[in-house]
Amino acid sequence: MAYSIYSPTSIIIWKTLAVSASLLIVIVLLSFSNQPNSLGTDFFHVTTHQSSLPPDTTNVSHLVFGLLGSVKTWHYRKPYIESWWRPNITRGYLYLDRNPTDDLLPWSGDYPPFRISDDNTRLLKETKHVSALMVRMVHAVIEVFREEKEGVRWYIMADDDTIFFVDNLADELSKYDHTKYIYIGCHSECVMSNQIFSYDMGFGGAGLIMSYPLAKMVQKNIEDCFKRYPYLNSADLILMTCVNDFGVSMTVHQGLHQHVST
């Protein structure tokens, strides 16, 4: 047989006191919450991530896309861009390696306007860089910045088979201060790729994002980076290394996905 150390009468008294104390606590907290600057207000406040951005929220018009493609693959890649590009709304350019062939002309207004990538012959000769393709891809930062400056907050560099959810992208970028030096990217879903290159590198298949001030600095100094690192045979690695030279590290955003085909 088990015995309680409390008598029935004492148990009733303790229950009454417990209920009374609970009611008193609720009354006190409610009275505090009715005061505008009271402890109660702070106590119930839920902290969320807020940025110190101007009142005008970042929207699609503040984004510029620099998309890298080639005439040879455009037939197969254009459905990707068609899925998210909004004529006369989204801003940006598709950079091709050469003039479009006749079967691609006239150029459809449903696609981003195209540009021919700069001739980097002189730059390659001066820097002795190991890869003309990688130089072309990174050099696009200069070219897209040259085209679009007015009202730009973010530059998004990507391949022509990258798919963006544009409204979601604008909403996410509105959480960051576009007046600061910010470089946004994400890791590869392939662990081996991260180990080979770097866990601090954004993988371009998912898109690489730079704030206006950072893009401005990169485009002014990128040719010097080619000279310092002529042996880097990856556009993503070149960009990361140059950005790191400015004291800027990658801000990882898990909403960007780099899928590797098998």
Image: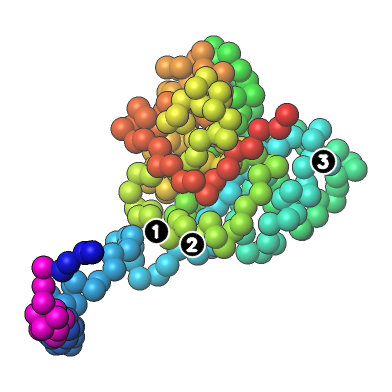
Question: Secondary structure beneath disc 3?
Answer: helix
Can you tell which quarter of the image residue 143 is in? top right
Secondary structure character of the magenta stretch overall: helix
Q: Amino acid at mark 1?
A: Lys
Q: Is residue 66 left or right of residue 145?
A: right
Q: Report which residue position mark 2 lands on.
A: 171
Q: Are marks 2 and 1 in contact (CB under 8 Å)?
A: yes
Q: Residue furthest front?
A: 1
> Do we see residue 175 in this rendering?
yes
Q: Residue at x 64, y 37 (%)?
A: 259
Give the spatial CA distance, label 2 vs label 1. Answer: 7 Å
- The magenta stretch spans residue 15: yes
Q: Residue at x 55, y 60 (%)?
A: 168
Q: Residue at x 58, y 13 (%)?
A: 130
> Do we see residue 223 in this rendering?
no
Q: Earlier in the sequence, mark 1 or mark 3?
A: 3
- Could you say where residue 244 lies in the image, as x and y percent from the top left? 37, 30
- The magenta stretch spans residue 11: yes
Of residues 127 and 87, the one drawn nearer to the viewer in this rendering = 87
Question: Secondary structure beneath disc 1?
Answer: loop
Q: Amino acid at mark 2?
A: Asp
Give the spatial CA distance, label 3 vs label 2. Answer: 30 Å
- Could you say where residue 161 lies in the image, as x and y percent from the top left? 70, 42
- Could you say where residue 78 lies in the image, as x and y percent from the top left? 78, 47
Q: Residue at x 79, y 35 (%)?
A: 73
- Magenta range is 5-18
Q: Amino acid at mark 3?
A: Tyr
Q: Which mark is residue 175?
A: 1
10 above or below 82? below
Q: Residues within 10 Å of mark 1 (few under 14, many from 20)?
A: some
Q: Report which residue position mark 3 lands on.
A: 76
Query: Given this view, does label 1 or label 3 mark the residue nearer the observer?
Result: 1
